[in-house]
Image (tube, rainbow, N blue to C red):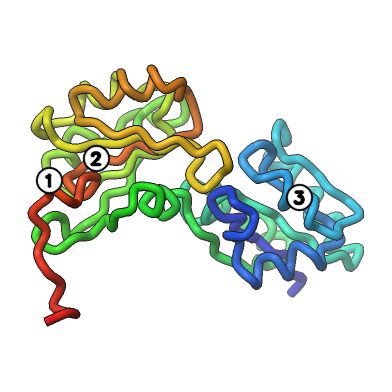
Protein backbone atom coordinates (compact mmCIF):
# COMPACT_ATOMS: atom_id res chain seq x y z
CA UNK A 1 0.00 0.00 0.00
CA UNK A 2 1.17 3.53 -0.74
CA UNK A 3 2.03 5.67 2.29
CA UNK A 4 2.23 9.23 3.56
CA UNK A 5 3.23 10.63 6.95
CA UNK A 6 1.25 12.59 9.52
CA UNK A 7 3.69 14.35 11.85
CA UNK A 8 2.97 16.13 15.12
CA UNK A 9 4.84 19.44 15.03
CA UNK A 10 4.85 19.85 18.81
CA UNK A 11 3.54 22.83 20.78
CA UNK A 12 5.41 25.57 18.98
CA UNK A 13 9.11 25.68 19.83
CA UNK A 14 10.81 24.16 16.77
CA UNK A 15 13.17 22.06 18.88
CA UNK A 16 10.23 20.28 20.53
CA UNK A 17 9.38 18.29 17.42
CA UNK A 18 10.49 14.65 17.73
CA UNK A 19 13.71 13.45 16.10
CA UNK A 20 11.68 11.19 13.79
CA UNK A 21 9.36 14.04 12.92
CA UNK A 22 12.25 16.38 12.06
CA UNK A 23 13.88 13.70 9.92
CA UNK A 24 10.70 13.28 7.87
CA UNK A 25 10.22 17.04 7.67
CA UNK A 26 13.70 17.52 6.22
CA UNK A 27 13.35 14.64 3.77
CA UNK A 28 9.86 15.54 2.57
CA UNK A 29 9.22 16.25 -1.09
CA UNK A 30 5.81 17.70 -0.30
CA UNK A 31 4.79 19.45 2.94
CA UNK A 32 1.16 20.19 3.80
CA UNK A 33 1.09 22.16 7.05
CA UNK A 34 -1.55 23.59 9.36
CA UNK A 35 -1.13 27.29 8.66
CA UNK A 36 -0.50 29.69 11.54
CA UNK A 37 -0.77 26.85 14.08
CA UNK A 38 2.68 25.58 13.07
CA UNK A 39 5.81 27.60 13.80
CA UNK A 40 7.13 29.06 10.50
CA UNK A 41 10.64 28.00 11.57
CA UNK A 42 9.58 24.37 11.16
CA UNK A 43 8.23 25.02 7.69
CA UNK A 44 11.59 26.57 6.79
CA UNK A 45 13.36 23.45 8.09
CA UNK A 46 11.59 21.39 5.46
CA UNK A 47 13.40 20.46 2.29
CA UNK A 48 10.09 20.12 0.46
CA UNK A 49 9.94 21.56 -3.03
CA UNK A 50 6.16 21.82 -2.67
CA UNK A 51 4.71 23.48 0.43
CA UNK A 52 0.97 23.82 0.87
CA UNK A 53 -0.69 25.80 3.65
CA UNK A 54 -3.86 23.85 4.45
CA UNK A 55 -5.57 26.91 5.93
CA UNK A 56 -8.69 27.38 3.81
CA UNK A 57 -8.35 24.05 2.01
CA UNK A 58 -11.27 21.63 2.17
CA UNK A 59 -10.87 18.02 3.24
CA UNK A 60 -11.29 16.91 -0.37
CA UNK A 61 -8.60 19.34 -1.53
CA UNK A 62 -6.15 18.11 1.11
CA UNK A 63 -6.84 14.46 0.36
CA UNK A 64 -6.58 15.04 -3.40
CA UNK A 65 -3.23 16.80 -2.96
CA UNK A 66 -1.86 13.99 -0.81
CA UNK A 67 -3.03 11.36 -3.29
CA UNK A 68 -1.64 13.21 -6.30
CA UNK A 69 1.84 13.53 -4.86
CA UNK A 70 1.98 10.09 -3.23
CA UNK A 71 1.06 8.46 -6.56
CA UNK A 72 3.83 10.51 -8.20
CA UNK A 73 6.29 8.79 -5.85
CA UNK A 74 6.82 11.76 -3.56
CA UNK A 75 7.41 11.65 0.20
CA UNK A 76 4.40 13.56 1.55
CA UNK A 77 4.34 14.93 5.11
CA UNK A 78 1.14 16.30 6.63
CA UNK A 79 2.31 18.51 9.52
CA UNK A 80 -0.19 19.04 12.34
CA UNK A 81 0.27 21.26 15.39
CA UNK A 82 0.84 19.64 18.79
CA UNK A 83 -0.01 15.97 18.77
CA UNK A 84 -2.36 14.93 15.97
CA UNK A 85 -4.31 12.67 18.34
CA UNK A 86 -5.76 15.70 20.18
CA UNK A 87 -8.23 17.71 18.10
CA UNK A 88 -6.11 16.95 15.06
CA UNK A 89 -8.91 15.95 12.64
CA UNK A 90 -6.76 13.22 11.16
CA UNK A 91 -9.14 10.24 11.12
CA UNK A 92 -11.32 11.64 8.33
CA UNK A 93 -8.21 12.24 6.22
CA UNK A 94 -6.93 8.72 6.82
CA UNK A 95 -10.31 7.09 6.19
CA UNK A 96 -10.66 8.68 2.76
CA UNK A 97 -7.07 7.98 1.78
CA UNK A 98 -7.35 4.35 2.88
CA UNK A 99 -10.31 4.03 0.49
CA UNK A 100 -7.90 5.20 -2.19
CA UNK A 101 -5.24 2.67 -1.20
CA UNK A 102 -3.00 5.08 0.74
CA UNK A 103 -1.95 4.37 4.32
CA UNK A 104 -0.81 6.84 6.99
CA UNK A 105 2.25 6.62 9.18
CA UNK A 106 1.63 8.70 12.32
CA UNK A 107 4.48 10.34 14.20
CA UNK A 108 3.26 11.66 17.58
CA UNK A 109 4.18 15.10 18.82
CA UNK A 110 4.43 16.96 22.11
CA UNK A 111 0.98 18.39 22.85
CA UNK A 112 0.57 22.00 23.94
CA UNK A 113 -1.10 20.50 26.99
CA UNK A 114 2.29 19.21 28.17
CA UNK A 115 4.06 22.42 27.20
CA UNK A 116 1.53 24.22 29.40
CA UNK A 117 2.41 21.97 32.34
CA UNK A 118 6.07 22.79 31.77
CA UNK A 119 5.29 26.51 31.67
CA UNK A 120 3.37 26.19 34.95
CA UNK A 121 6.19 24.10 36.46
CA UNK A 122 3.76 21.50 37.68
CA UNK A 123 2.45 18.03 36.90
CA UNK A 124 -1.14 17.32 36.01
CA UNK A 125 -1.33 14.18 38.12
CA UNK A 126 -0.12 14.81 41.66
CA UNK A 127 -0.35 12.50 44.64
CA UNK A 128 -3.20 13.40 47.03
CA UNK A 129 -4.29 16.22 44.69
CA UNK A 130 -5.35 14.80 41.33
CA UNK A 131 -4.98 11.29 39.99
CA UNK A 132 -6.72 12.04 36.68
CA UNK A 133 -6.41 14.48 33.81
CA UNK A 134 -9.52 15.62 31.94
CA UNK A 135 -8.99 17.02 28.44
CA UNK A 136 -12.02 18.65 26.88
CA UNK A 137 -13.37 21.51 24.78
CA UNK A 138 -16.47 23.72 24.90
CA UNK A 139 -19.50 23.55 22.65
CA UNK A 140 -19.43 25.94 19.74
CA UNK A 141 -19.83 26.17 16.00
CA UNK A 142 -18.60 22.60 15.45
CA UNK A 143 -19.84 20.98 18.69
CA UNK A 144 -23.47 21.03 19.81
CA UNK A 145 -22.96 20.34 23.54
CA UNK A 146 -20.22 19.64 26.04
CA UNK A 147 -19.73 18.10 29.48
CA UNK A 148 -17.78 20.90 31.12
CA UNK A 149 -20.11 21.30 34.16
CA UNK A 150 -20.26 17.55 34.79
CA UNK A 151 -16.52 17.01 34.32
CA UNK A 152 -15.61 19.95 36.55
CA UNK A 153 -17.46 18.36 39.47
CA UNK A 154 -14.94 15.51 39.60
CA UNK A 155 -12.31 17.61 41.35
CA UNK A 156 -9.52 16.50 39.01
CA UNK A 157 -7.18 18.49 36.77
CA UNK A 158 -9.05 19.79 33.75
CA UNK A 159 -7.52 21.30 30.61
CA UNK A 160 -9.80 23.07 28.16
CA UNK A 161 -8.76 23.40 24.53
CA UNK A 162 -10.29 25.75 21.96
CA UNK A 163 -11.99 27.90 24.56
CA UNK A 164 -10.00 31.14 24.77
CA UNK A 165 -12.55 33.25 22.95
CA UNK A 166 -15.27 32.07 25.36
CA UNK A 167 -13.36 31.98 28.66
CA UNK A 168 -15.94 33.93 30.61
CA UNK A 169 -18.78 31.65 29.56
CA UNK A 170 -16.77 28.47 30.20
CA UNK A 171 -15.65 29.51 33.68
CA UNK A 172 -19.17 30.60 34.60
CA UNK A 173 -20.31 27.04 33.86
CA UNK A 174 -17.58 25.30 35.84
CA UNK A 175 -19.04 23.63 38.92
CA UNK A 176 -16.16 23.66 41.37
CA UNK A 177 -15.37 26.12 44.19
CA UNK A 178 -14.66 29.63 42.86
CA UNK A 179 -11.35 29.71 44.74
CA UNK A 180 -10.08 26.65 42.84
CA UNK A 181 -6.70 27.54 41.27
CA UNK A 182 -6.77 28.13 37.52
CA UNK A 183 -4.39 29.32 34.83
CA UNK A 184 -4.42 30.41 31.22
CA UNK A 185 -1.33 29.59 29.16
CA UNK A 186 -0.95 31.38 25.84
CA UNK A 187 1.36 30.03 23.11
CA UNK A 188 3.01 27.48 25.39
CA UNK A 189 6.71 27.11 24.42
CA UNK A 190 6.61 29.94 21.84
CA UNK A 191 8.85 33.00 22.36
CA UNK A 192 5.76 35.10 23.22
CA UNK A 193 4.44 32.60 25.78
CA UNK A 194 2.27 34.11 28.53
CA UNK A 195 1.25 32.43 31.79
CA UNK A 196 -1.56 33.94 33.86
CA UNK A 197 -2.54 32.44 37.22
CA UNK A 198 -5.60 33.01 39.34
CA UNK A 199 -8.74 31.22 40.42
CA UNK A 200 -11.90 30.06 38.69
CA UNK A 201 -13.48 33.31 39.88
CA UNK A 202 -10.95 35.73 38.41
CA UNK A 203 -8.77 33.99 35.80
CA UNK A 204 -10.81 35.12 32.79
CA UNK A 205 -10.56 38.76 33.84
CA UNK A 206 -6.82 38.43 34.49
CA UNK A 207 -6.20 36.72 31.15
CA UNK A 208 -8.11 39.42 29.25
CA UNK A 209 -6.16 42.10 31.12
CA UNK A 210 -2.97 40.37 29.89
CA UNK A 211 -4.23 40.67 26.32
CA UNK A 212 -5.00 36.98 25.77
CA UNK A 213 -7.76 36.52 23.22
CA UNK A 214 -6.87 33.29 21.39
CA UNK A 215 -4.53 30.28 21.16
CA UNK A 216 -4.42 29.51 24.87
CA UNK A 217 -5.25 26.63 27.18
CA UNK A 218 -7.35 26.92 30.33
CA UNK A 219 -6.07 24.79 33.21
CA UNK A 220 -8.27 24.22 36.26
CA UNK A 221 -7.30 22.40 39.44
CA UNK A 222 -5.17 22.50 42.54
CA UNK A 223 -2.10 21.34 40.57
CA UNK A 224 -1.89 24.88 39.15
CA UNK A 225 -0.47 25.94 42.53
CA UNK A 226 1.44 22.89 43.80
CA UNK A 227 2.98 24.78 46.71
CA UNK A 228 -0.43 25.15 48.38
CA UNK A 229 -2.01 21.97 47.04
CA UNK A 230 -1.05 19.70 49.95
CA UNK A 231 0.46 17.09 47.64
CA UNK A 232 1.83 13.87 49.05
CA UNK A 233 5.25 12.43 48.54
CA UNK A 234 5.49 9.92 45.69
CA UNK A 235 6.17 6.31 46.61
CA UNK A 236 9.03 6.52 44.10
CA UNK A 237 10.96 8.35 46.81
CA UNK A 238 9.96 6.16 49.74
CB-based contact (under 8 Å), mark 3 and mark 2: no
Indicate the position of residue 162 as horizontal and vertical percent values.
44, 34
Q: How busy is the neighbourhood of tag 3: few (under 14 within 10 Å), some, or many (20 plus)?
A: many
Secondary element under disc 2, as helix, strand or loop, is strand
Secondary element under disc 3, as helix, strand or loop, is helix
Between tags 1 and 2, which lies in front?
2
Q: CA distance from mark 1 to mark 2?
A: 9 Å
Q: CA distance from mark 3 to mark 1?
A: 40 Å
CB-based contact (under 8 Å), mark 1 and mark 2: no
Classify residue 126 as left or right of residue 188.
left
Residue matched to label 3: 43
Picture layout, residue 202 above or below residue 2: above
Disc number for residue 155: 1
The answer to whether residue 23 shows anywhere in this view is yes
Q: Quadrant of residue 139?
A: top left
The answer to whether residue 95 shows anywhere in this view is no
> What residue is at 91 percent from the left and 63 percent from the top?
72
Q: CA distance from mark 3 to mark 2?
A: 33 Å
Quadrant where the C terminus sits is bottom left
Q: How busy is the neighbourhood of tag 1: few (under 14 within 10 Å), some, or many (20 plus)?
A: some
Instruction: Identify the mark nearer the N-term, 3 or 1.
Output: 3
Residue matched to label 2: 220
CB-based contact (under 8 Å), mark 3 and mark 1: no
Picture layout, residue 233 above or below residue 140: below
Indicate the position of residue 176 as horizontal and vertical percent values.
11, 34
Q: Quadrant of residue 1?
A: bottom right
Instruction: Identify the mark nearer the N-term, 3 or 2.
Output: 3
> What residue is at 72 percent from the left and 44 percent from the top?
40
Q: Quadrant of residue 128?
A: bottom left
Amino acid sequence: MLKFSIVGAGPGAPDLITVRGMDLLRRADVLIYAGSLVNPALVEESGAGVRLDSWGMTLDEIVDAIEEHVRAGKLVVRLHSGDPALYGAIVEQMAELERRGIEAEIVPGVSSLFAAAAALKTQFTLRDVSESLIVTRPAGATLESDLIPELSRLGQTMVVFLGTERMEEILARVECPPDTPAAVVYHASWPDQKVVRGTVADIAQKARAAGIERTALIVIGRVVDPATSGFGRSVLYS
